[in-house]
Image: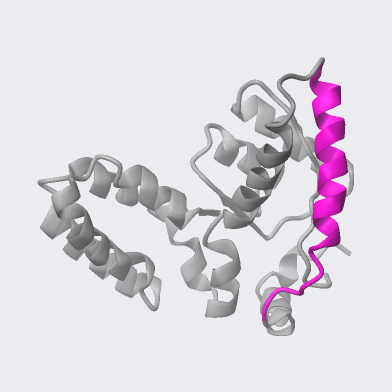
Amino acid sequence: MDGCKDILGIWIGEHESAKFWLNVLNDLKNRGVQSVYVFCVDGLTGFREAISSVYPKAQIQRCIIHQIRSSTKFVSYKDIKKLMADLKTVYQAINEEEALNNLMKFKETWGKTYPSCVKSWEENWDILSTFFAYPAEVRRIIYTTNIIEGLNRQFRSITKTKPSFTNDDSLRKMLYLASKKIVEHWTARCRNWDQVLNQLDIMFSEQKVG
């Protein structure tokens, strides 16, 4: 509630499946996370299904950065600059109506050349467009998973110096100790936090846990 980032847990698993994410979310709920307003996720298998099962009222926003990467990975180098410029009009639109209109224009221009790219945006639109319902201050927080990506980079820089771990617990302990040091540096509040909090308070008043 003070507007600072935090780490709620560290989980280790061989596969990122619906069952794995279900265990993670149930663990959070059992520890007291009774309600979540918005999840920002990438395209991990089973995550969306697990969220809907444990937190059915939560909104889901798919990371725009991950979506761009996955949908444009087969775009030719000669087309990528122009395609990205057209795509930017979609995810940087003022509102969802404008975004949908621009998506239709994007489809008209690139649908025949790169049908899989257009299809990816159309099929995932329900979770790509969530952030359009929010003001700019909130959009900046929920449109990308860059925060967790940055954390994972820090974890990798620590674990790469150790060639192997005897078991999952030894890895978990190292990551836990690392996370304690990382969080110590997360002292800055989210930009315009008071305004963000007031917006969320109004938008999710019915979901308050009392």
Q: Residue at x 51, y 71 (%)?
A: 133
Q: Nearer the viewer, residue 77 or 39?
A: 77
Q: Is residue 166 above or below residue 24?
A: above
Highlighted magenta segment, given as a residue range: 167-191
Relative horizontal placement of residue 52, taking residue 86 as reference (left or right): right
- Quarter containing the C terminus: bottom right
Q: How many marks?
A: 0
Is 181 one of the magenta-colored residues? yes
| Residue 5 picture location, percent across and down | 76, 62
- Quarter containing the N terminus: bottom right
Relative horizontal placement of residue 21, taking residue 181 as reference (left or right): left
| Residue 140 picture location, percent across and down | 55, 70
Is 60 one of the magenta-colored residues? no
Q: Nearer the viewer, residue 139 or 201?
A: 139
| Residue 119 picture location, percent across and down | 27, 45
Q: Residue at x 50, y 53 (%)?
A: 63
